[in-house]
Image (cartoon, rainbow, N blue to C red):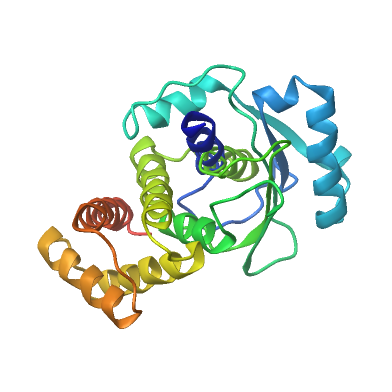
């Protein structure tokens, strides 16, 4: 169960970009990315397509199609969770539309995605520089949504013709994984955890803080101010993630 859960968020993470989300001359700005398990099962694919058609109001026939394979997911998970996924474990899918939107709007199929919220996805995407576009996330069967990020990142790469560095993908994926763990360990909602992470990242960015001990202090202070309890272990993991994300973006002057 944990493997299929993590695999779902990884799919979305692989699509994020580190540049402004603009439509390139070679792309329609519309990409649908299927997990390989879903793509190979017509019933599953129909379920996913029905969600996209009902919520996005775009013609899927106009979209570029990408598939996230187990190897894509494993390339990220090997450096974080050390999990290995098979071709029958990559289910989550994402639709990316970069047309006619100056903000980030994320629609999550809460009937299937049980853990990761739209705010959690938005926080991770913001970490890699994605702040504009429509994103739709679903799965043919119930899953936490943790691997879906890989698919989102891959879709953004296709829509913008920009390759996202592996370290940036890993930082975004790890952020989702840590936030998910905090939700599992406590009674805190995913959106509340995402708010804490966003507040911390804003403070780190504003003061250009890179020292982990200082980031740990900021996380603890923001958590207290929001009446959220986070274990010492999760605080340290979150500090590592935020530090890595901040340094990666700073080095590229995004």
Instruction: Please state the horizontal and vertical placement of residue 5, each as a whole percent of the image.
Output: 52, 37
Task: Report the front residue among 187 and 135.
Answer: 187
Asked if residue 54 shows in the view, the reply is yes
Task: Report the front residue among 212 and 37.
Answer: 37
Q: Would residue 25 appear left or right of 173 to someone viewing this image?
A: right
In the image, is residue 48 above or below residue 238?
above
Residue depicted at 62% across the width and 19% down the height: 88
Task: Report the front residue among 211 and 78.
Answer: 78
Q: Where, quadrant-wise, is the C terminus in this rendering?
A: bottom left
Instruction: Please state the horizontal and vertical placement of residue 35, each as a whole percent of the image.
Output: 65, 30
Asked if residue 206 shows in the view, the reply is no
Extreme residue in the bottom direction: 225
Residue depicted at 30% across the width and 82% down the height: 225
In the image, is residue 122 above or below residue 223?
above
Instruction: Please state the horizontal and vertical placement of residue 165, each as a whole percent of the image.
Output: 39, 38
Instruction: Please state the horizontal and vertical placement of residue 153, each as a whole percent of the image.
Output: 54, 42
Residue depicted at 42% across the width and 57% down the height: 183
Q: Would residue 180 appear left or right of 157 to someone viewing this image?
A: left
Q: Quadrant of residue 106?
A: bottom right
Q: Quadrant of residue 43?
A: top right
In the image, is residue 191 above or below residue 169?
below
Q: How many numbered marks, from 0 up?
A: 0
């Amino acid at each position: 169960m944990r493997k299929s859960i993590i695999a779902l968020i990884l799919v979305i993470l692989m699509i994020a970009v580190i540049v402004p989300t603009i439509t390139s001359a070679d792309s329609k700005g519309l990409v649908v990315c299927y997990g390989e398990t879903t793509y190979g099962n017509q019933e599953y694919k129909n379920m996913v397509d029905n969600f996209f058609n009902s919520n996005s109001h775009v013609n899927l026939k106009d979209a570029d199609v990408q598939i996230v394979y187990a190897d894509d997911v494993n390339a990220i998970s090997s450096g974080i969770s050390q999990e290995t996924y098979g071709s029958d474990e990559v289910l989550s899918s994402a639709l990316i539309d970069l047309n006619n939107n100056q903000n980030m709007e994320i629609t999550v199929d809460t009937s299937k995605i049980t853990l990761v919220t739209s705010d959690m996805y938005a926080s991770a995407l913001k970490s890699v520089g994605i702040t504009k576009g429509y994103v739709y996330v679903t799965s043919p069967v119930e899953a936490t949504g943790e691997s879906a990020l890989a698919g989102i990142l891959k879709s953004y790469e296709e829509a913008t013709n920009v390759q996202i560095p592996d370290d940036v993908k890993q930082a975004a994926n790890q952020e989702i994984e840590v936030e998910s763990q905090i939700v599992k360990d406590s009674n805190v909602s995913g959106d509340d955890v995402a708010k804490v992470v966003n507040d911390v990242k804003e403070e780190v960015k504003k003061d250009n803080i890179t020292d982990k001990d200082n980031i740990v202090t900021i996380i603890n202070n923001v958590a207290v101010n929001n009446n959220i309890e986070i274990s010492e272990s999760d605080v340290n993991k979150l500090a590592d993630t935020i530090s890595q994300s901040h340094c990666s973006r700073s080095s590229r002057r995004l």
